[in-house]
Amino acid sequence: MSILDGFFVTGVASDPMLWREHDPWMVVLSAALAVGASMVALHMAALAREADTPRSRGWILGSGAFAMGGGIWAMHFVGMLAFTLCARGAFNPWLTLASMLPGWGASWVTLQWLVRPQLSAGLLALGGLLMGAGIGTMHYLGMAASSMTPYFGYDPLGFAISIVVAVVLAMLALWVRLGLQRHVLNNNYLTTAIAGLVMGLAITGMHYTAMAALRFNAPLLQIESQGPAAGQSFSLALAILAVVLGMLAVALVAGLRYRDLFTGVRASEARLRAVLETAVDGIVTIDAQGTVLSFNP
C-alpha cells in the first residue's frame, strides 16, 4: 500500500449536502483576505522596483512575501472553519506552522521576478507554476494538519483541477500585473488592483475546488465537535492576524521609503551646498524685505 492510497479516494461519491455546511460570511471573509494580501504583495513589488538600494529592495520584497504568505495561510484556515464539518477536531500545531512556509517561499521568488523590467513568457509561466504549487502545497499541508485526516481523502480528478485552477489564475495575475500595464493600461494602481483580484481568486478558487474534491471514507460522527461559535471566533482572530501582518508590512515599507527619500533629500542638499560654496561668482539670497539670508564665500 503506497502513501497515495491514503491520499486519493476513488469510488466514493461527493455528498452535495456538505456544501450547505459552509458559512457564507466566512467564505466571503476568506476571499477578502486572499485578495487583500495579494494586492498588498503586488504593490510591494512595484515599490521594490523603485527602491534606491538592494538592501531596501530586499526588505520591501520580504515584507510583501510575508504579507502574501500570511494571507494565503489565513485564507486557508478561515475557509476550513467556514466548512463547519472540517472545523471540528484539532490541528497539529507544528504541521500548521510548517504549512506557512510554501506560501512564503513561493511569494518571495515570484515577487523577485516581478521586480524585473521585462519578464519572458517562460519566466511568466514558471512564476505562475511556482505560485500555484506554493498555494496548493500550503493547502494540502494545512489539511494534513487536521485531526480529521484519517477520515477523508481526495478525488484524483478534483485534486488535479484544484492545482490547475491555482496555476492558471496565478499566471493570469502575473500577466495582468506586467503585460496589461505595459501594453494596455498605464495605471499602476489599477493594474495592481486587478492583478490582486485575480491572484486572490487563484488562492480562493484553489481552496474551494480542493474542498470539493474531499471524499469522506469514515463516519463523521466519530469526530469531536468544537461548536460553530468557536470556529467563527477563531476565524475572526485569523482575519485580524492577517490584517495586522499586512499593516506591519505596509508600515515597514513606508518607513523604508521615507528613509530613502530623506537620505536622497539630504544628499541633494549637500550637492547643492557644495556647488554654491565653490562657485566663482557671488550668490546672495535676499528675502522680500531686503534682508540678506545667505551668501557664498
Image: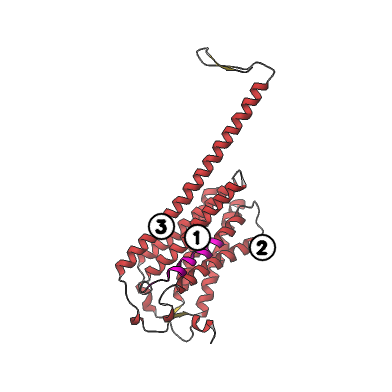
Q: CA distance from mark 1 to mark 2?
A: 24 Å
Residue at mark 2: 122
**What are the residue bounds of the magenta stretch?**
90-105
> In front: mark 1 or mark 2?
1
Pick out the residue farthest to the right.
Answer: 280
- Tell me the residue at 46%/74% (across/down): 144
Where residue 222 sits in the image (x, y, percent)?
A: 34, 82
Residue at mark 1: 69
33 or 97, nearer to the observer: 97
Residue type of the residue flagged with mark 3: Leu
Left or right of 291: which side holds 20? left
The numbered dot on residue 263 is none
Pick out the residue farthest to the front.
Answer: 94
Residue type of the residue flagged with mark 1: Gly
Main SS, magenta residues? helix
Q: CA distance from mark 3 to mark 1?
A: 12 Å
Residue at mark 3: 241
